[in-house]
Amino acid sequence: MYDSAGINQKICFQLGTQYVYEQQLIDSDQILVMENKHKKEIQRVFGDQFNSKISVLHIKDVYKYGATTLKEILQLKLTAYL
């Protein structure tokens, strides 16, 4: 099972998407982020308690929400975690 959330509260509100919440991180076995800046934002907001769960996929965050190219890249990258 998976869940998805953003780390930029303003953008999540604008797009009507889910902003990450602490219980979501607590319940997660793995936390996959696209870039190091996303990991740093989780650390800034929630502290270092989730560091051992976080893996960085090294995907530039330059794609529009739901972009087909991003979905394809994610499919390739995520096979290593499934």
Image (spheres, rainbow, N blue to C red):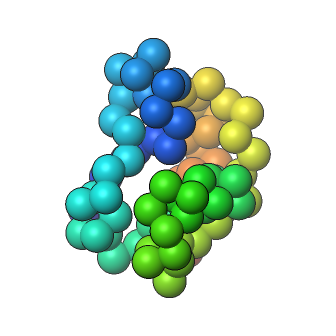
Q: Is residue 1 visible to us here?
A: yes
Quadrant for the N terminus, please: bottom left
Residue at position x 40%, y 22% from top? 13
Residue at position x 67%, y 31% from top? 63
Q: Position of residue 20 (x, y in %)?
A: 38, 47
Q: Position of residue 3 (x, y in %)?
A: 31, 52
Placement of 78 over or under 65, stated as above or below: below
Residue at position x 55%, y 64% from top? 43
Front residue of this view, candidates 21 and 35 = 21
Quadrant for the C terminus, please: bottom left
Task: Say which quarter of the image contains residue 18.
Answer: top left
Q: Name the side, left or right, on which 16 lies relative to 46.
A: left
Residue at position x 61%, y 25% from top? 64
Placement of 32 over or under 7, stated as above or below: below
Front residue of this view, candidates 45 and 75 = 45
Q: Position of residue 55 (x, y in %)?
A: 58, 71
The residue lying furthest to the bottom in this view is 52
Q: Name the side, left or right, on which 5 lies relative to 2.
A: right
Q: Name the side, left or right, on which 59 lies relative to 78.
A: right
Q: Position of residue 35 (x, y in %)?
A: 69, 55
Placement of 14 over or under 60, stated as above or below: above
The residue lying furthest to the top in this view is 14
Placement of 27 over or under 7, stated as above or below: below
Q: Is residue 81 visible to us here?
A: no
Number of numbered labels in the structure image: 0
